[in-house]
Image (tube, coloured by chain):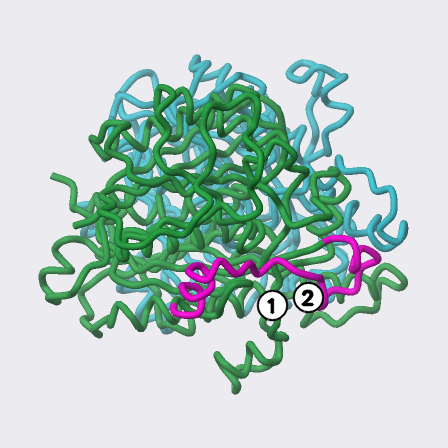
Amino acid sequence: MPQRVFVTGLGIISAIGSNVKEVMDSLKEMRTGVGPLTRIDSIYKDDIPVGEIRASNRELLEEVSPSAGAYYSRTALLGLIAARQAFAQARFSDSGNLRTGLISGTTTGGMDRSEHFYQAYLKDNHKGRIRDIIGHDCGDSTERIADNLGIKDFLSTINTACSSSANSIMLATRMIRQGKLDRAVAGGSDALTLFTLNGFNSLMILDKQPCRPFDENRNGLNLGEGAGFLVLESEASVIRENKPVLCEIKGYGNSCDAYHQTASSPEGHGAFLAMKKALETSHLAAEDISYINAHGTGTKNNDLSEGNALEKLFAGKVPPCSSTKSYTGHTLGASGAIEAVLSVLALQYGWIYPNLNFSQKMNELSFTPVTGFSAGLPLRHVMSNSFGFGGNNSSLIFSKC
Amino acid sequence: MKAYIKGAAILSPQKTFGEKGFPGEVTDYHGVSYLKCIEPAYRDFIDPMVARRMSRIVKMGVCSALKCMQDSGISMPDAILAGTGLGCLEDTEKFLGSVYTHEEKLLNPTPFIQSTHNTIAGAVALAIKCHNYNATYTHRGFSFESALEDAFLHLEENPELNLLAGAFDELTTNSYNITRRMGLWKNHPVNSADLLNYQTRGSLPGEGVAFFMLGGRKGSDMAVLRSVKTFYKPHGYPEIESIVDQFLRNEGLTPGDIDLVIAGINGDFATDRVYYQLKEGVLGNRPFAWYKHLCGEYDTSSSFALWLASVILKDQHVPDCALLEDIAPVGIERILIYNHLRENNHVLYLTERC
C-alpha cells in the first residue's frame, strides 16, 4: 500500500503578502498585488503592470540570512523565505532516521544577477563580476535553501516552465507514497527579470491593464514574482510525530499537450488529460471537486484551452472556479506552488477566491468564474491547475482530512 | 525495481552516434581547451524546415531521442524525462544579448521560446505527438539522476511502462569563457588522452546528449540499471566510503562483486583525490575505468558513463582507452559508476549484465 501524503506546513511570499497571514488578508479584502514595475530598469516600466514584491534584495537578505554574504539571487531569497515559513510551521524534529527531501521548481534561476553580469560581459568578456553569474543555474537556489534548512537526503530542481513547482509537489508526493522519502519541502520560486519581461513581451501576451482571466475581453497576462513551499509528510511520519495536518494530497496528473512549443491546443487536450489523470490517481469523480484554482493566465489562448478542457471534464457542470493570477500576477515557475498554498488555505478555511477584474463571459464557454469572496464553505476537494510552455500540463488535487 | 536498458543513443565528442557499441576508433583531441560533440546528419531525423528554427542543442536532443526510440523499437514512450544542468544556453544568451543590444525593442521571440529548459522534452513530445508524462530536471550534477529517479518511480507504479530518459548539456563560447574565469578548467591547452598527466587544477570542459529507453520488463536489452543514488555535500572521505559501502550492501553485494568501477576522474588533481582514495580503500583492487577524456566534464556527464557501462556489459569488452590501468576485466557482470560534480553532487549507479 502506498503511503498517504499530508501537508503539514505552508510558506508563501508574493505581491499580495510576505507570509500566509498577509496573503490571507489581501485575498479576503480582494486586494490585488498587480501594479507598476518599480524594481527593474525597463523601457516598459510605465506600460506593463506586474505583481512585484516591494522589498529589495538587500531587505530580503536581511530577513533571511544577514551573515550569508550578498550573493543570493532573488529567486533564492524568495524561495528561502517561503521554505523557512513552511519548515517552521511543520516543526521538524531532528530525528536522524527520517529521510527529508527538498524539491524546487524555477524557470529563471539566478537570472536577475546574471543580467547584471551579462550587461558588463557583453561590452568586454573580461568584465562582469563572477559572483553575479555563479548562481545562474536553476539548482543554485535549491542548494542554498537546502543548506540553510539543513536538508541533504534528496535534492532536485524542476524546470517545466510554468508548471515547474506543481511538478515538484508531484515528485515529492510520489516519492513519499513509495516510501523513498518520509517528508519533503516542495515548491518553487521565481523572481521578475528583464529577461522574462522582454520574453513575454516579445510574444505579445502581456496585458497593459490588470489581467482579466476568463473574460471575453482578456488581453494577456501580468507577470509576477514570488515563492511557495509546502511541507509534505508520509502518514507514518505524521503519526510518529503526532502532528496536526492541513490536508492530504490525493491526486496528481502530468500530461503533455504536444500541440505547439508555446501555444496550447484550442480544445485543451493536454489540460484535459492532466486533470483526468489527477482524478484517476485520487479515485475521485469529477463531481467530487468543490473548487478549481485554475491556471487562468488571462491570455486568449490559455483561458480558451483550459476553459474547453474544464467543460469537457466536468461535462458542462464546472464547479466554482477562479484564477488568482489577477491577485499575484503569473509567477511562472512559482505559480504552481503559490496556488497550491492558496488551495490548501481554501480547504482549511472554506474559502473561495474571486477571479478579480472579470466582467464578461467568454463566448465559447458556458461557465463564468467566481467573482466574489466566500468563506465558511464545506469544501472537500480542491483542484489546482498549472500549464506551461512546451505543453507541460499538471494538475493537483488537495483533500480535506 | 530494476530498469532494463532497451536502447540508447548518444552524441558526444566521440563517434558514438549510430554505433551499436563503443566506436572502433577513438577521437583524440590535441592542444584543445574544450571538447564539442560530433554532430550527426540531422536531416535523417528532423525535417530541415523544422531544424532551421532549432538551436544546435535542440537539434541534438531531438535527434538522439528519436534515434533511441528507433533503436529500441519503442515508438511511443510512456514518459519523457530529461535532465540538464544548464538548459538551452545558446538561445538564452542570444535572447539576453538581444535585450541589451536592441534596447528591449522589436525582439525576436524564437530564442526566448527555445531558451526554456523543457524545450527538448517538449519538442520530442511534439515530434511524436506524445501526450504522456513529461518532465525536465535541472539540478547541477543531479539533473540526469533526477530523471532516472522519476523513471524508477514510474516503474514502481507500473512495471509495464517504457520510459525515455535523457540528458543534455551544451558548451557555448560564452559558457566556456565564463566558466573558465570561474577557474573550472585547465589554463593551458590539453591533449585529451594526457588529461591525467598534467597534475594541475581544473578539468577539460565538454558536452553531450544521451537518451535511454528504460523498461520494467526483460527483453533484448543492453544492460540492467539496478539502482541510482545521489548524495549531497558529504563530510569528507569517510562518509563517502561508508555511503558507497552501504549502497552495495543494500543491493546485497560486496565490493568483490563489482567487476569494474567507472569513475568520474576529470584530471583536476585536487578533486580527483577521492576516486583514488576509494580505489585504495573500500573498492580496493577492483579494475577502474574513466571517461572524461572522451567527453569532457559537464553537469550530466554521468549519462556518458551509463552509456559506456551499457556497451561494456553488452559487448563484454572494456575499450583500452577507458581503462585506468592495463588490467582488463573479463566476465563483467556488474559495473559501479561513481561521479561527483565539484565535490557537491555525488552519484552512484549500479549496472548489471542482462
The chain coloured green in the image: A
Question: At numbered mark 2, what does the secondary structure look like: helix, strand or loop?
Answer: helix
Residue A38: say if magenta.
yes
Majority SS type along the magenta span:
loop
Question: Measured from the top left, where is residue B329 in percent x and y?
Answer: 36, 39
Residue A316 versus residue B335 in the image, above or below: above
Mark 1 lies on residue: A73
For the question of whether residue B197 can be seen, the reply is no
Report the residue at 55% width, 44% height from top. B84
Image disc number at residue A113: 2
Question: Measured from the top left, where is residue B89 in percent x and y?
Answer: 69, 46
Q: Tell me which chain the residue with mark 2 is part of.
A: A
Question: At numbered mark 1, what does the secondary structure look like: helix, strand or loop?
Answer: loop
Report the residue at 76% width, 62% height from top. B188
Q: Colour of chain B?
A: cyan
Q: Quadrant of the C terminus of chain B?
A: top left
Question: Measured from the top left, where is residue B103 in percent x and y?
Answer: 88, 54
Q: Quadrant of the N terminus of chain B?
A: top left
How far apart are the two marked residues, 1 and 2, measured between alpha carbons?
6 Å
Q: Would you say the residues marked 1 and 2 are in contact, meaning their CB atoms lie under 8 Å apart?
A: yes
Q: Count the marks: how many?
A: 2
Specify the segment rendered in magenta. A21-48
Residue B136 versus residue A242 in the image, above or below: above
Image disc number at residue B101: none
In the image, farthest residue toward the bottom = A67
Judging depth in this view, the residue of A265 and A308 nearest the camera is: A308
Question: Measured from the top left, where is residue A351 in percent x and y?
Answer: 33, 53
First reached walking from the N terminus: tag 1 or tag 2: 1
Looking at the rendered structure, the kind of residue marked 2 is Arg
Looking at the rendered structure, the kind of residue marked 1 is Ser
Report the residue at 31% width, 43% height from top. A382
